[in-house]
Amino acid sequence: MLGAIVKRLGQMLFVMVGISVLVFLIFFATPGADPAARIAGRNASPETLAAVRKDFGFDRPLPVQYALMMNRLFITQDLTSFVNRGWKVVPAVLDVAPVTLSLVVGGAILWVVGGVLIGLVAAATRGSILDRTLMMLGLVGVSMPVYWLGEVMNLITQSRFHDSWLFAWVPPLGYKPLSSDPVGWFLTLVIPWITLATLYMGLYGRVLRANLVEAGQEDYIRTARAKGLSETRILVRHALRTSLITIVTLFGLDFGALVGGAALLTEVVFGLQGIGKLTYDALRSLDLPVIMATVMYASFFVVIANAAVDLLYVVLDPRIRKA
Amino acid sequence: MTDQAASPANLAGEVPAPSSRVGRGPWATALRKLRSDQAAMAALLLFLVIVALCLLAPFYAKYVAHTDPFRSTLSGKIMVDGKLVPIMQSSTEGLGLGFTPIGPTWDFTAYFLGADGQGRDVAARLLYGGRNSLVIAGVSTAICLFLAAIVGLVAGFFGGTIDWILSRLLDVLWAFPVYLLAISLSIVLISHGIDIGPISINASSLSLPIFIIGIIYVPYVARPIRGQVLALTQSEFVLAAIGLGVPSHRILFRDILPNVMTTLIVFVPLMMAINMLTESALSFLSIGVQPPAASWGTIIQDGQEQLYTRPMVALAPGIAIVITVLALNILGDGVRDALDPRSKLRIRSA
């Protein structure tokens, strides 16, 4: 067990170093333009360019530049923006992290619960109209651009039907901190959570249904049936248990994709000032240090989260534990 | 399906088949199966109709709507129900200083879906944008599958150090959240374009999003291909070929490539669907297709400002994306069932 854990942690460190090198190369060594001009932003003065060159050590060899960069990103954390002069980037990223986490964790809970329910209902009513409708809706969910769905949600809840009894409770766009206003926090996030979950709920339902149907042919299910257990009990207590392994694996993968992609787009559409919105604003003003910091911190978070899921596996799965 | 030696075609050559059951090759069998899949065929038809409509964009703009969808038209009036209506109407909201573009006229000859914030015909832009979205999705899929096939074949077949290096590279790319990778590449390339010796790509060129989207999903295809090649390399017919002294490039192209071809084809519609969503997201974030060119993603972004007054600007391209991607996903399911019914292939969606 210890060996497996050490191996997984080693792999995690390797991937983190790999990603940092890749990000560094993309931002500083892509041929085409002077990296200083990229960092300084639009229409930078020659003085700013000179300051950027000195600041990032562009007159020194690449490995030194890399070390300088990593030092400023993670150790001294004093990387500054040149578009908003003197703005410290890393604290800004860490400050808004709770917003992104609130969005992602809530959405994830909703989509896993919803996905499991859809999968169970579809598998239990296999071949029926309900089953087919759920599966089709799942496919539609996967086919929707999440930011567009968000806009449609805004159109419905903020504008067209805001005055109806159904959506009168929806607060204006924005984020309220959990510590100072728990009710406001919850209410502002409900619609973003639903938007985010719609994307994945159907997909999880589809995968789970396929797994449950496959599990239905296994010997242990026949045994359970021979014991005279009810169909519900067989489905929930026997078939679901093994099928959940796939869901956990998927969850580990999608969580990363979500933090890096869908959550960013959702934040932009709902005006939630999280890491995604920060990245978006930086994209619009071509503020590269901010983008570099958000990309690096977000991908490290994803890598660590994935490793944590795998480690949980090692602890949970007796086959790996004993090996 | 993975072993060609046992395919019905080869057996049928030796045993005279009864006339009612003519032996078919694996491709013909798959095609027959796909043809009998009604949902997949309907999806294919729908997709082809969308492609055809988007190809007709210049025709529609010039001869039907009589408009230039790339030039802003802030003044001007059109006839609606016998009345002359300005394209940009004075806003009645707020201070009354802004303008509200004309809403949908539901008349194909002028502003069918209304105008955007610059008075441009949304319906015409939708068709032009669809062309770009489809081209980017298609070409980036081709690039992605080509690169993934090379990486997967080389890593799986040659093994050893090459495999180790390629696999570690794939590990890193795989763990890197795709959108963050795309954002990093886009912001660097789109702010200044590429200028490497003889290769010079303008920052607003379509080839930048194509190239970026083509690269970021390579690990998702290359990994399963590598695994399959690794298994094939241990299979008896490949071992026999090696034993007979067949040169390795011949084994790669004649024995292994045809067997991973089915996997590659299964990926085509699914990757196109994912690439289309990725392109629209990048364009929405203003780091994909650059103005004045349009794609469905950029039109949704154009429509964001008038979401509550003229929702059709943002709604229409979104509906177009949903229909196209849904058609590709249904087709993808059908192709997978036909070619690789036992496969567990699944692509992560972002």
Image (tube, helix red, strand yellow):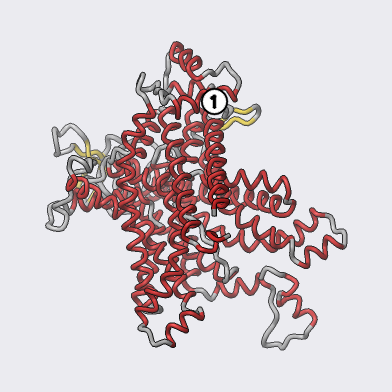
Please give the name of the residue rendered at 72% of the width and 45% of the height, measured from the top-left corner: B161
Where is residue B116? Give x, y as percent.
31, 42
Please give the name of the residue rendered at 41% of the width and 58% of the height, measured from the top-left corner: A142
Q: Is B178 placed left or right of B316 in the picture?
A: right
Q: Is B254 placed left or right of B133 in the picture?
A: right
Give neighbour class at mark 1: few <14, some 14-19, many 20+ (Cα, 10 Å): few
Give the quarter of the image for residue A206. bottom left
Where is residue A77? Give x, y as percent.
41, 26
Q: Which residue is mark 1?
A: A67
Residue A199 to residue B74: above or below:
below
Residue B142 to residue A138: above or below:
above
Outermost residue toward the right in this view: B245
Where is residue B104? Give x, y as percent.
27, 50
Residue B292 visible to the viewer: no
Q: Where, quadrant-wise, is the N terminus of chain A in this rendering?
A: bottom right
Residue closest to the eye, B26 or B347:
B347
Where is residue A122? Give x, y as percent.
37, 73
Which type of secondary structure does the marked residue at label 1 adopt? helix
Give the quarter of the image for residue B10. bottom right
Residue A29 visible to the viewer: yes
Q: Amino acid at mark 1?
A: Ala
Residue A173 to residue A217: above or below:
above
